[in-house]
Amino acid sequence: MIKYVIKRILSMIVILWCAGLVIFTITYLVPGDPASLLLGKEASAETIAQKRIVMGLDKSYLQQLGTYMFNTFLRLDFGTSWVFSSPVIDELLIRLPRTLIVGLSAMVLNVVIGTLLGIFAGTHEGKWQDSAVMIIAMVFISAPDFFVALLLILLFSLKLQILPAYGIDSWKCYILPIISSSLGGIAINARQARSSMLEVIRADFVTTARSKGQREGVIVRKHMLPNAMMPIITGVGGGLATVIAGSPVIESVFSIPGIGAYLLSGVNQHDYPVVRACVIFFALFASIAILLMDLCYAFLDPRIKAQYSKGKKVG
């Protein structure tokens, strides 16, 4: 089992390294001179040249790439913001809790409500309860997050005036962003859980359990749900990464100063150290989500345990 964990951690390191390589190359190839954009049109050529030296833009692509990869992955130095002249890591640490509050809270709602709705729909296949859950799921899957967020603002902030529309002044400010982030994930998890339950519900061991006179609730909890968990875990792992990756949209709509809003600010102002650091953070979070998903696989699937505990593959 330890070998399995080490293998997945090494894979995560490779993913982060590739993410750093890709985002640096993309920002390097973006048209325009960041030094000129920061100093404005009235800056002289000499001033711009000096600024390029300070920003490290006077070096070749390979020199800049080598410096960036060394500082980021060996020294854990994400650089200094070109616009605010402050360490990027300090700003990330300040904004991180706000992004995690919204993202992790939305993920909890995704997992709990989505899975329960999927189980409910799967155990009522063909009935009105199944149809109602699937119709609601299709509506929220089709609706973009920013559109749902605007509708919630119109209803609860402007019309009912019971929840704030923006900011982080109190805990109430997080309610609408969390709901906006979670609705799409709830719908996706509900559909995934329903499909998994329908695959298991016709299995022979379920028929045998019913023939023995076991209650339906016991059959669902002890027989159907454990065997349907693998596809559900896959959806949960992907949903966790999606929620965090979608934070720029939600944080922009609700004016939450999180990492997503920091990323958008960096893109708009050509502040590439900020953009690169935020992308690395999102890649790290997605990698951790995938790692946790793989560990759940290893815990639930005895074949993975056997493969890595004995040091050989199980055919």
Image (tube, rainbow, N blue to C red):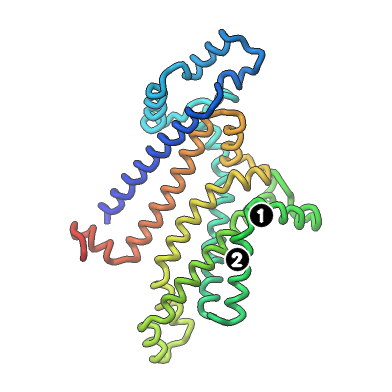
Residue 56 locus on image (x, y percent): 47, 19
The picture quadrant where one finds residue 127 is bottom right
Residue 110 falls left or right of residue 290: right
Q: What type is the residue that disc 2 sits on?
A: Met
Residue receiving disc 1: 175
Circle 1 Cα neighbour tier, 10 Å, few/some/many (<14 / 14–19 / ≥20):
some
SS of the residue under disc 2: helix
Q: Residue at x 40, y 55 (%)?
A: 292
**Residue 143 vertical position relative to residue 36 in the rendered view, above or below:** below
Residue 138 locus on image (x, y percent): 60, 65
For residue 138, the mark is 2
State the residue in front, 102 or 266: 266
Residue 9 falls left or right of residue 126: left
**Residue 296 vertical position relative to residue 121 in the rendered view, above or below:** above
State the residue in front, 136 or 171: 136
Residue 123 locus on image (x, y percent): 51, 79
Q: What type is the residue that disc 1 sits on?
A: Ile
Q: Residue at x 74, y 50 (%)?
A: 164
Residue at the extreme front of the image, as rendered = 31
For residue 133, the mark is none
**Residue 72 vertical position relative to residue 95 in the rendered view, above or below:** above
The picture quadrant where one finds residue 230 is bottom left
Residues at badges 2 and 1 in contact (C-beta under 8 Å)?
Answer: no
2 or 1: tag closer to the N-terminus: 2
State the residue in front, 44 or 4: 44
**Which quadrant of the rendered structure holds the N terminus?**
bottom left
Residue 215 locus on image (x, y percent): 46, 87
Q: Residue at x 73, y 49 (%)?
A: 165
Circle 2 Cα neighbour tier, 10 Å, few/some/many (<14 / 14–19 / ≥20):
some
